Amino acid sequence: KPKKEVKDIYTPFWNYATKVLESRLDLKPYTIPEGYEQKEAMVGKGKRAGIVRTDSYAYSTDKLRQIRTAHVQGGALLQVLNFVMMPGMNYDLPFFGADLVTLPGGHLIAMDMQPLFHTDEYRQKYAQPLQGAFEKHKQNLPWGGNFPVEAAKFFSPIFLWSRPKEDEVVETHVFEAFKDYLHGYLDMVAEAEPVTDPAKLAEIRDSQIAYLRYRAEKDPARGMFLRFYGEEWTEEYIHGFLFDLEKKIESGEYVPPV
Ligand code: DBV
């Protein structure tokens, strides 16, 4: 007897994002390490067995050092769209981050413009423009409750964090919020002017590195990737692709402006 049909929840999100990125940005290719563009593994036993597939996508632009997505498709077991945009170090832009996760028990939704600095001026520049969207969407996406305390310093005042139970909430309210946040972020990118002050550039560099180091070290997907694909693949995927800034600096492939 065939298994109950499981919806593919996040493909429409990524298809939408791809269209928007293509139409609003001048995209350049971004090399994904060989063997990491797509990965599959058989997971589970007997009737619960299934394939978990992870597809990776990446671009860059003049202002965005790396735009990248990991799309995990494991049917009823797990679905994830983790989509992050990382500005070049000569911009004080926040990071765009969407972590859309579907587990057997429900959904886990995180969307934010993760700030480099915690000043009123910075919030005015990069959170305020989306305050209205945040207020609107949080009515449909109530606060999802406890999350790691050490992560708090990386969030903005417009952090959407919710744990909806129903697929329908993801397909409607989460999708609408995703569209608003994506366009809101690209509006900020369009307006961003390069920073030239060496002291400011040094602050941006330190903040970007601290953030991405945290994300790599505390990646909540590490356990799952280890189980599916093994240690070697997982660590290379996390440090060599998902949060690759430090490796790119070490190898000289990315040269910070100071
Ligand atoms: N999270 C990632 C990447 C993923 C990913 C690269 C490619 O950063 C998936 C996959 N996140 C993922 C999975 C889980 C979570 C959970 C599979 C579930 C883990 C589990 O339950 O076993 C937001 N994501 C989480 C959690 C938080 C976030 C707070 C709960 C983890 C916990 O309670 O410890 N991710 C976190 C965050 C951003 C983000 C703050 C910023 C927008 O992307």
Image (cartoon, rainbow, N blue to C red):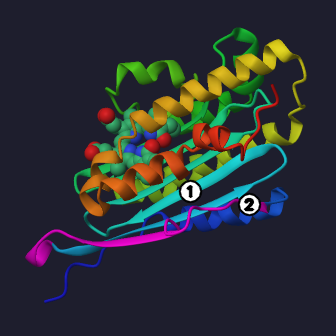
User: How far from the left and from the top, in percent, is residue 221?
Assistant: 36, 47
The reply to whether residue 163 is in sight is no
Position of 132 relative to 178 (above/below): above
Residue that badge 2 annotates: 20
Residue under the image location 34 percent in, 46 percent down: 222
- Circle 2 SS class: helix
Position of 171 relative to 154 (above/below): below
Is residue 38 located in the magenta-colored stretch of the structure? yes
Residue under the image location 81 percent in, 63 percent down: 23
Residue under the image location 41 percent in, 70 percent down: 39
Quadrant of residue 49 in the image? bottom left
Position of 127 relative to 166 (above/below): above
User: How far from the left and from the top, in percent, is residue 20?
Assistant: 73, 60
- Circle 1 SS class: strand
Residue under the image location 51 percent in, 68 percent down: 11
Q: Observer-nearest residue: 129 or 155?
A: 155
Which residue type carries mark 2?
Val
The reply to whether residue 26 is in sight is yes
Q: Which residues are magenta?
A: 28-48
Is residue 101 located in the magenta-colored stretch of the structure? no
Chain-order first, disc 2 or disc 1: 2
Which residue type carries mark 1?
Thr
Q: Quadrant of ligand 1?
A: top left
User: How far from the left and from the top, in percent, is residue 175?
Assistant: 54, 54
Position of 245 relative to 228 (above/below): above
Residue that badge 1 annotates: 69
In the current view of this chain or complex, which residue is farthest to the front? Answer: 251
Q: Which quadrant, please, contains the C terminus?
A: top right
